[in-house]
Protein backbone atom coordinates (compact mmCIF):
# COMPACT_ATOMS: atom_id res chain seq x y z
CA UNK A 1 0.00 0.00 0.00
CA UNK A 2 1.48 3.32 -1.14
CA UNK A 3 0.34 6.90 -1.48
CA UNK A 4 -0.06 7.47 -5.21
CA UNK A 5 -1.63 10.91 -5.58
CA UNK A 6 -2.78 13.99 -3.71
CA UNK A 7 -4.73 17.21 -4.11
CA UNK A 8 -5.33 20.33 -2.06
CA UNK A 9 -8.37 22.62 -2.05
CA UNK A 10 -9.30 25.88 -0.38
CA UNK A 11 -12.88 25.91 0.92
CA UNK A 12 -14.83 28.94 2.12
CA UNK A 13 -17.08 28.33 5.11
CA UNK A 14 -19.68 30.75 6.47
CA UNK A 15 -19.91 30.95 10.23
CA UNK A 16 -23.45 30.59 11.51
CA UNK A 17 -23.12 32.72 14.61
CA UNK A 18 -21.14 35.81 15.56
CA UNK A 19 -18.26 35.04 17.90
CA UNK A 20 -16.33 38.17 18.82
CA UNK A 21 -13.46 37.59 21.27
CA UNK A 22 -10.55 39.45 22.86
CA UNK A 23 -8.78 38.99 19.52
CA UNK A 24 -11.49 40.94 17.66
CA UNK A 25 -14.44 40.14 15.41
CA UNK A 26 -14.68 36.76 13.70
CA UNK A 27 -14.91 36.65 9.91
CA UNK A 28 -18.32 36.01 8.35
CA UNK A 29 -16.64 33.59 5.92
CA UNK A 30 -13.53 31.62 6.82
CA UNK A 31 -11.04 29.88 4.49
CA UNK A 32 -10.09 26.25 5.16
CA UNK A 33 -7.62 23.99 3.40
CA UNK A 34 -8.60 20.39 2.61
CA UNK A 35 -5.87 17.85 1.80
CA UNK A 36 -6.72 14.67 -0.11
CA UNK A 37 -4.47 11.60 -0.25
CA UNK A 38 -5.10 8.72 -2.68
CA UNK A 39 -3.47 5.30 -2.34
CA UNK A 40 -2.55 2.91 -5.15
CA UNK A 41 -5.95 1.20 -4.84
CA UNK A 42 -7.87 4.46 -5.22
CA UNK A 43 -8.85 4.83 -1.56
CA UNK A 44 -9.03 8.41 -0.31
CA UNK A 45 -8.07 10.08 2.97
CA UNK A 46 -9.15 13.62 3.89
CA UNK A 47 -7.54 16.12 6.23
CA UNK A 48 -8.16 19.75 7.12
CA UNK A 49 -6.17 22.77 8.21
CA UNK A 50 -8.41 25.41 9.74
CA UNK A 51 -6.13 28.44 10.14
CA UNK A 52 -6.08 30.65 13.20
CA UNK A 53 -3.25 33.07 12.33
CA UNK A 54 -3.24 34.66 15.80
CA UNK A 55 -2.65 31.20 17.30
CA UNK A 56 -0.14 29.58 14.95
CA UNK A 57 1.05 32.32 12.57
CA UNK A 58 -0.31 30.37 9.59
CA UNK A 59 -2.84 31.53 7.01
CA UNK A 60 -4.87 29.56 4.49
CA UNK A 61 -2.57 30.80 1.73
CA UNK A 62 0.62 29.80 3.54
CA UNK A 63 -0.81 26.40 4.49
CA UNK A 64 -1.87 25.63 0.92
CA UNK A 65 1.56 26.67 -0.36
CA UNK A 66 3.38 24.45 2.15
CA UNK A 67 1.15 21.48 1.41
CA UNK A 68 1.41 21.78 -2.37
CA UNK A 69 5.10 22.62 -2.64
CA UNK A 70 6.61 20.68 0.27
CA UNK A 71 4.53 18.25 2.27
CA UNK A 72 2.17 16.45 -0.11
CA UNK A 73 4.71 15.76 -2.89
CA UNK A 74 7.00 14.19 -0.27
CA UNK A 75 4.32 11.59 0.56
CA UNK A 76 4.10 9.99 -2.89
CA UNK A 77 5.41 6.42 -2.79
CA UNK A 78 5.29 6.22 1.01
CA UNK A 79 3.28 3.71 3.03
CA UNK A 80 0.51 5.60 4.91
CA UNK A 81 0.92 3.18 7.82
CA UNK A 82 4.38 4.66 8.53
CA UNK A 83 2.79 7.59 10.31
CA UNK A 84 5.58 8.69 12.63
CA UNK A 85 8.21 8.42 9.90
CA UNK A 86 6.09 10.54 7.56
CA UNK A 87 5.59 13.23 10.20
CA UNK A 88 9.35 13.19 10.91
CA UNK A 89 9.97 13.83 7.21
CA UNK A 90 7.63 16.83 7.34
CA UNK A 91 9.40 18.15 10.44
CA UNK A 92 12.71 17.88 8.57
CA UNK A 93 11.30 19.73 5.55
CA UNK A 94 9.89 22.59 7.62
CA UNK A 95 9.76 23.04 11.42
CA UNK A 96 6.66 24.29 13.25
CA UNK A 97 3.75 24.96 10.79
CA UNK A 98 1.55 22.55 12.72
CA UNK A 99 -1.72 23.50 11.04
CA UNK A 100 -0.40 22.39 7.66
CA UNK A 101 0.95 19.18 9.21
CA UNK A 102 -2.41 18.63 10.87
CA UNK A 103 -4.06 18.28 7.45
CA UNK A 104 -1.58 15.55 6.49
CA UNK A 105 -1.95 13.77 9.84
CA UNK A 106 -5.77 13.67 9.56
CA UNK A 107 -5.62 12.43 5.97
CA UNK A 108 -3.30 9.57 6.95
CA UNK A 109 -5.67 8.45 9.71
CA UNK A 110 -8.69 8.73 7.41
CA UNK A 111 -6.98 6.77 4.64
CA UNK A 112 -5.95 3.96 7.00
CA UNK A 113 -9.48 3.87 8.37
CA UNK A 114 -10.82 3.18 4.88
CA UNK A 115 -8.20 0.48 4.37
CA UNK A 116 -9.17 -1.17 7.68
CA UNK A 117 -12.89 -0.56 7.23
CA UNK A 118 -13.00 0.93 10.74
CA UNK A 119 -13.65 4.34 12.35
CA UNK A 120 -10.54 6.36 13.14
CA UNK A 121 -11.06 6.05 16.90
CA UNK A 122 -9.96 2.41 16.64
CA UNK A 123 -6.50 3.70 15.64
CA UNK A 124 -6.43 5.99 18.69
CA UNK A 125 -6.71 3.39 21.42
CA UNK A 126 -10.35 2.50 20.90
CA UNK A 127 -13.74 3.73 22.03
CA UNK A 128 -13.92 4.87 25.67
CA UNK A 129 -17.20 6.78 25.42
CA UNK A 130 -19.66 4.34 23.81
CA UNK A 131 -22.59 6.62 24.67
CA UNK A 132 -20.87 9.60 23.07
CA UNK A 133 -20.32 12.92 24.80
CA UNK A 134 -21.91 16.31 25.28
CA UNK A 135 -20.75 19.47 23.55
CA UNK A 136 -21.07 23.11 24.48
CA UNK A 137 -22.16 26.18 22.54
CA UNK A 138 -20.05 29.32 22.56
CA UNK A 139 -21.38 32.87 22.93
CA UNK A 140 -19.15 35.75 21.87
CA UNK A 141 -18.76 39.25 23.24
CA UNK A 142 -22.30 40.64 23.06
CA UNK A 143 -24.34 43.09 25.08
CA UNK A 144 -25.79 41.83 28.35
CA UNK A 145 -29.25 41.54 26.81
CA UNK A 146 -28.00 39.71 23.70
CA UNK A 147 -25.86 37.38 25.80
CA UNK A 148 -28.81 36.39 27.99
CA UNK A 149 -31.04 35.94 24.95
CA UNK A 150 -28.49 33.67 23.24
CA UNK A 151 -27.95 31.67 26.43
CA UNK A 152 -31.68 31.09 26.83
CA UNK A 153 -31.93 30.13 23.16
CA UNK A 154 -29.27 27.42 23.39
CA UNK A 155 -30.63 26.05 26.65
CA UNK A 156 -34.05 25.77 25.03
CA UNK A 157 -32.34 23.86 22.20
CA UNK A 158 -31.11 21.29 24.72
CA UNK A 159 -27.56 22.39 25.52
CA UNK A 160 -26.36 21.78 29.08
CA UNK A 161 -23.05 23.71 28.91
CA UNK A 162 -22.41 27.23 27.60
CA UNK A 163 -19.09 28.92 26.98
CA UNK A 164 -19.03 32.71 27.22
CA UNK A 165 -16.26 34.94 25.91
CA UNK A 166 -14.94 37.66 28.21
CA UNK A 167 -12.04 40.11 28.22
CA UNK A 168 -12.29 43.76 27.16
CA UNK A 169 -14.69 44.96 29.89
CA UNK A 170 -14.04 43.19 33.21
CA UNK A 171 -16.88 44.80 35.15
CA UNK A 172 -19.25 44.23 32.26
CA UNK A 173 -18.05 40.63 32.07
CA UNK A 174 -19.08 40.03 35.67
CA UNK A 175 -22.50 41.55 35.03
CA UNK A 176 -23.06 39.48 31.87
CA UNK A 177 -22.04 36.18 33.44
CA UNK A 178 -24.11 36.86 36.55
CA UNK A 179 -27.11 37.72 34.38
CA UNK A 180 -26.77 34.47 32.44
CA UNK A 181 -26.36 32.51 35.66
CA UNK A 182 -29.67 33.95 36.91
CA UNK A 183 -31.42 33.35 33.58
CA UNK A 184 -30.61 29.68 32.97
CA UNK A 185 -31.33 26.63 35.13
CA UNK A 186 -28.84 25.84 37.87
CA UNK A 187 -27.85 22.54 36.24
CA UNK A 188 -26.60 24.36 33.12
CA UNK A 189 -22.83 24.67 33.33
CA UNK A 190 -21.11 27.93 32.43
CA UNK A 191 -17.48 28.31 31.41
CA UNK A 192 -15.69 31.51 30.46
CA UNK A 193 -12.80 32.26 28.12
CA UNK A 194 -10.75 35.47 28.18
CA UNK A 195 -8.35 34.44 25.38
CA UNK A 196 -5.54 35.92 27.47
CA UNK A 197 -7.29 39.29 27.69
CA UNK A 198 -6.80 40.03 31.42
CA UNK A 199 -3.80 40.76 33.58
CA UNK A 200 -3.32 38.92 36.87
CA UNK A 201 -4.97 41.47 39.23
CA UNK A 202 -7.97 41.81 36.92
CA UNK A 203 -8.33 38.06 36.57
CA UNK A 204 -8.19 37.58 40.35
CA UNK A 205 -10.88 40.23 40.83
CA UNK A 206 -13.21 38.93 38.10
CA UNK A 207 -12.84 35.24 38.93
CA UNK A 208 -13.26 35.96 42.62
CA UNK A 209 -16.61 37.55 41.79
CA UNK A 210 -17.63 34.59 39.59
CA UNK A 211 -16.20 31.69 41.57
CA UNK A 212 -19.61 30.21 42.36
CA UNK A 213 -20.98 30.76 38.84
CA UNK A 214 -18.54 29.02 36.47
CA UNK A 215 -17.06 25.56 36.08
CA UNK A 216 -13.74 26.97 34.84
CA UNK A 217 -12.01 29.91 33.20
CA UNK A 218 -10.01 29.34 30.05
CA UNK A 219 -6.79 31.27 29.45
CA UNK A 220 -7.48 34.31 31.66
CA UNK A 221 -4.06 35.91 31.01
CA UNK A 222 -1.40 35.79 28.26
CA UNK A 223 -0.05 32.31 27.49
CA UNK A 224 3.53 32.93 28.62
CA UNK A 225 2.62 33.88 32.20
CA UNK A 226 2.51 30.48 33.87
CA UNK A 227 3.41 31.91 37.27
CA UNK A 228 0.45 34.26 36.93
CA UNK A 229 -1.88 31.37 36.12
CA UNK A 230 -0.71 29.58 39.25
CA UNK A 231 -1.29 32.74 41.27
CA UNK A 232 -4.86 33.05 39.93
CA UNK A 233 -5.62 29.42 40.78
CA UNK A 234 -4.35 29.86 44.32
CA UNK A 235 -6.11 33.18 44.92
CA UNK A 236 -9.56 32.34 43.53
CA UNK A 237 -10.07 28.59 43.70
CA UNK A 238 -11.51 28.74 40.17
CA UNK A 239 -10.32 25.95 37.89
CA UNK A 240 -8.07 27.20 35.10
CA UNK A 241 -7.95 25.66 31.64
CA UNK A 242 -5.06 26.41 29.29
CA UNK A 243 -5.39 26.80 25.54
CA UNK A 244 -2.94 29.30 24.06
CA UNK A 245 -0.32 28.24 26.63
CA UNK A 246 0.03 24.70 25.22
CA UNK A 247 0.94 23.83 21.64
CA UNK A 248 3.50 21.09 22.28
CA UNK A 249 4.43 18.45 24.84
CA UNK A 250 7.19 20.74 26.05
CA UNK A 251 4.62 23.46 26.69
CA UNK A 252 2.41 21.05 28.64
CA UNK A 253 5.30 19.86 30.80
CA UNK A 254 6.05 23.48 31.70
CA UNK A 255 2.41 24.05 32.65
CA UNK A 256 2.41 20.95 34.83
CA UNK A 257 5.68 21.93 36.51
CA UNK A 258 4.33 25.43 37.23
CA UNK A 259 1.03 24.02 38.54
CA UNK A 260 -0.59 26.53 36.23
CA UNK A 261 -3.76 24.70 35.15
CA UNK A 262 -6.47 22.22 36.05
CA UNK A 263 -7.50 21.20 32.53
CA UNK A 264 -6.15 21.30 28.97
CA UNK A 265 -7.67 22.44 25.68
CA UNK A 266 -6.47 20.49 22.64
CA UNK A 267 -6.88 22.00 19.18
CA UNK A 268 -5.60 19.75 16.41
CA UNK A 269 -4.36 22.67 14.30
CA UNK A 270 -2.39 23.91 17.30
CA UNK A 271 -0.54 20.69 18.14
CA UNK A 272 -0.16 19.20 14.64
CA UNK A 273 -2.92 16.59 14.42
CA UNK A 274 -4.30 13.48 16.05
CA UNK A 275 -0.98 11.76 16.72
CA UNK A 276 0.42 14.73 18.63
CA UNK A 277 -2.92 15.15 20.40
CA UNK A 278 -2.70 11.53 21.60
CA UNK A 279 0.62 12.33 23.26
CA UNK A 280 -0.74 15.47 24.91
CA UNK A 281 -3.82 13.64 26.18
CA UNK A 282 -1.67 10.83 27.60
CA UNK A 283 0.52 13.21 29.58
CA UNK A 284 -2.49 15.20 30.77
CA UNK A 285 -4.17 11.99 31.87
CA UNK A 286 -1.08 10.89 33.75
CA UNK A 287 -1.28 13.98 35.96
CA UNK A 288 -5.07 13.92 36.33
CA UNK A 289 -5.74 16.84 33.99
CA UNK A 290 -9.01 16.55 32.01
CA UNK A 291 -8.91 17.33 28.29
CA UNK A 292 -11.39 19.40 26.30
CA UNK A 293 -11.17 19.00 22.52
CA UNK A 294 -11.97 22.22 20.67
CA UNK A 295 -12.53 22.60 16.93
CA UNK A 296 -12.05 26.21 15.78
CA UNK A 297 -14.72 26.88 13.14
CA UNK A 298 -13.76 23.77 11.18
CA UNK A 299 -15.71 22.06 8.43
CA UNK A 300 -17.06 18.57 9.06
CA UNK A 301 -13.64 17.14 8.12
CA UNK A 302 -11.68 18.73 10.95
CA UNK A 303 -14.57 18.56 13.40
CA UNK A 304 -14.93 14.83 12.74
CA UNK A 305 -11.27 14.29 13.63
CA UNK A 306 -11.92 16.03 16.94
CA UNK A 307 -14.93 13.79 17.53
CA UNK A 308 -12.85 10.65 17.06
CA UNK A 309 -10.21 11.94 19.48
CA UNK A 310 -12.79 12.90 22.11
CA UNK A 311 -14.37 9.44 21.92
CA UNK A 312 -11.06 7.89 23.05
CA UNK A 313 -10.54 10.13 26.10
CA UNK A 314 -11.30 9.05 29.62
CA UNK A 315 -14.71 10.38 30.76
CA UNK A 316 -14.66 13.77 32.46
CA UNK A 317 -17.29 16.22 33.73
CA UNK A 318 -16.49 18.70 30.97
CA UNK A 319 -18.38 18.95 27.68
CA UNK A 320 -16.31 19.04 24.51
CA UNK A 321 -16.29 21.96 22.05
CA UNK A 322 -16.74 20.70 18.51
CA UNK A 323 -18.16 22.64 15.58
CA UNK A 324 -20.48 19.92 14.27
CA UNK A 325 -23.43 22.23 14.94
CA UNK A 326 -21.99 25.56 13.85
CA UNK A 327 -20.69 25.43 10.27
CA UNK A 328 -21.47 24.08 6.86
CA UNK A 329 -19.34 24.43 3.75
CA UNK A 330 -20.13 26.79 0.92
CA UNK A 331 -19.29 25.54 -2.57
CA UNK A 332 -17.79 22.01 -2.43
CA UNK A 333 -20.04 19.46 -0.77
CA UNK A 334 -19.17 17.58 2.40
CA UNK A 335 -21.32 14.99 4.10
CA UNK A 336 -20.77 13.59 7.59
CA UNK A 337 -21.80 10.25 9.05
CA UNK A 338 -21.59 11.69 12.57
CA UNK A 339 -24.96 11.67 14.33
CA UNK A 340 -26.17 13.89 17.16
CA UNK A 341 -28.87 13.61 19.81
CA UNK A 342 -29.59 16.98 21.39
CA UNK A 343 -26.24 18.28 22.60
CA UNK A 344 -24.69 14.80 22.48
CA UNK A 345 -22.45 13.50 19.70
CA UNK A 346 -22.73 9.76 19.11
CA UNK A 347 -19.90 7.44 18.01
CA UNK A 348 -19.81 7.05 14.21
CA UNK A 349 -19.51 3.60 12.68
CA UNK A 350 -18.45 4.55 9.15
CA UNK A 351 -14.85 3.88 8.10
CA UNK A 352 -12.24 6.57 8.56
CA UNK A 353 -13.40 9.97 9.71
CA UNK A 354 -16.86 9.30 8.30
CA UNK A 355 -16.80 12.37 6.05
CA UNK A 356 -16.93 12.71 2.27
CA UNK A 357 -15.78 15.70 0.21
CA UNK A 358 -16.54 16.43 -3.43
Image (tube, rainbow, N blue to C red):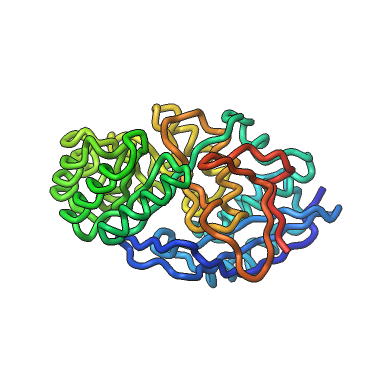
Tell me if 315 is positioned left or right of 66 in this view: left
Against 52, residue 222 (above or below) is above
Rendered residue at 37%/47% (across/down): 163
Tell me if 276 is positioned left or right of 251 in this view: right
Against 107, residue 66 (above or below) is below
State whether residue 129 appears in this view: yes
Rendered residue at 43%/49% (across/down): 154
Pick the front one: 317 or 248: 317
Rendered residue at 67%/40% (across/down): 348
Tell me if 167 is positioned left or right of 272 in this view: left
User: Residue 193: horizontal and vertical position, in percent?
Assistant: 32, 50
Rendered residue at 67%/34% (across/down): 122
**Quarter of the image where the C terminus is located:** bottom right
State whether residue 254 appears in this view: no
Q: Count the labels in the image.
A: 0
Outermost residue, right side: 41
User: Residue 289: horizontal and vertical position, in percent?
Assistant: 39, 32
Q: Can you tell which quarter of the image residue 33 is in?
A: bottom right
User: Residue 55: horizontal and vertical position, in percent?
Assistant: 40, 59
Tell me if 108 is positioned left or right of 202 in this view: right
Amino acid sequence: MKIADWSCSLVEVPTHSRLDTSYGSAEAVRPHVIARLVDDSGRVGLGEASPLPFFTGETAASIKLQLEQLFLPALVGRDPRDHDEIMAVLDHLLPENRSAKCAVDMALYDLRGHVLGQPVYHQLGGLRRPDGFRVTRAIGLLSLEETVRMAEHWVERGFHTLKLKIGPDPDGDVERIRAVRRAVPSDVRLRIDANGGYDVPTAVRVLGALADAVEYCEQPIPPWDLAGLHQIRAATGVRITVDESVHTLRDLLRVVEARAADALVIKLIKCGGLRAAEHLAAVAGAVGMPVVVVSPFETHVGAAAGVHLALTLRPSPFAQELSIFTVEPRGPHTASAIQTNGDRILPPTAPGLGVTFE
